Image (cartoon, rainbow, N blue to C red):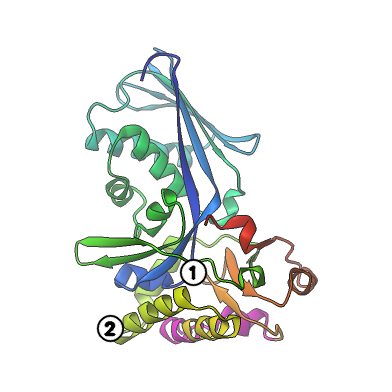
Amino acid sequence: MAAEEIHTFKSSGKFLITAEYLILKGAKGLALPLKYGQILSVKQNGSAFITWSSHVFNNTWFEAVFHVKDLSILSSNNDDVANSLQKVFRESRNLNPDFLHIGVEATITADFNLAWGLGSSSTLINNIASWAQVDPYLLLEKTFGGSGYDIACAGAKGPITYQLQEESRIVEDVSFHPPFHKNIFFVYLGKKMNSRTGMSYFKEKAEYNDRALQEVSAITEKLIACKDLEQFEGLLNMHEALLSAILKMPTIQESLFSNYPHTIKSMGAWGGDFVLVSGESEEQVRKYFISKGLEIIIPYKDIVLS
């Protein structure tokens, strides 16, 4: 990277439509990369420092300065974020000893609210891995952890299926743009769920077997092939019922929206972030959820990369 030359890396956010917690156990999940994501711009400046700034749209929310030699934190406005970023830098250098030995100005910008849970960590990891020329899955494993489906989405051009098998992962591009996509919406529930907290609950409370994994994988396959909204809703309801039994938790529709006439499905950690909603029309969906105090309602076509 020549001095003054700016290098740019872009990664997409994600929605996990099926498999949720079970994707870590080998179930096949349907995942959708999003039009929203993060862009990392890096410019060498010949100094001994890494000057980092993080933005949401035009608002700066995090700034830090690191020393290039030992990656020590010289200043920051958020110690927790600085420590996490320092760990990512150090693991990147462990994977590629030639990484980051000349001072840079680095800026990362998200075009979505980070509270939405669309992949602020995975898009960061994927961008830095691209910059460092290291394996993003390995970098994720050594830092934040997780199944890796979000890393697969970060670089995908369209919908994928993701499945862990023993020591490998299977990522396949799939054709998923249902003819009833105008009847699919994503509604933000107003609070971000910590995926690690969700996984801790899953490890402690969940009861499942190989048959449950197979059933989830089968639902994934049927959803991809589905051409009918009513059948699609039925499959989503089956998935919710299955996960409800495994997690010993009521579905989000049972607990909060029992009078909604169509289908609501959790995505990711149950109880927060976005839910997938089907409906007769955008007007009908907006009217119902706005009456519940939920105003962030995004049509499928406006957010899914396809």
The secondary structure type at the circle numbered 2 is helix
Q: Where does the magenta region start and end?
A: 240-258
Quadrant in the rendering for residue 286: bottom right
Disc 2 to disc 1, how far (Cα)?
Answer: 20 Å
User: In the rendered structure, which amino acid carries the disc numbered 2?
Assistant: Asp
**In magenta stretch: residue 223:** no
Q: How many marks?
A: 2
Quadrant (top left, top right, bottom left, bottom right) of the N terminus: top left
| Residue 9 horizontal side relative to residue 182, left or right | left
Q: Toward the viewer: 238 or 205?
A: 238
Question: Where residue 17 is drawn, which disc sits there?
Answer: 1
In the image, residue 139 lies at what x, y percent? 30, 45
In the image, residue 189 lies at what x, y percent? 64, 66
Looking at the image, is mark 2 or mark 1 earlier in the sequence? 1
At a point 56% along the width and 76% down the height, the residue shown is 265
Residue at which label 2 appears:
210
Quadrant in the rendering for residue 218: bottom left
User: In the rendered structure, which amino acid carries the disc numbered 1?
Assistant: Ile
| Residue 273 horizontal side relative to residue 205, left or right | right
At a point 33% along the width and 74% down the height, the residue shown is 27
Q: Are marks 2 and 1 in contact (CB under 8 Å)?
A: no
Question: Where residue 54 is drawn, which disc sits there?
Answer: none
**In magenta stretch: residue 254:** yes
The secondary structure type at the circle numbered 1 is loop
Q: Toward the viewer: 253 or 75?
A: 253
| Residue 189 horizontal side relative to residue 104, left or right | right
Task: Specify few, some or many for label 1: CA neighbours under 10 Å numbering under 14, 14-19, or 20 or more.
Answer: many
* Majority secondary structure of magenta residues: helix
Q: Which-is-in-front pick, marks 2 and 1?
A: 1
Relative to 210, residue 16 above or below: above
In the image, residue 46 lies at what x, y percent? 39, 12
Can residue 119 be seen in this snapshot? Answer: no
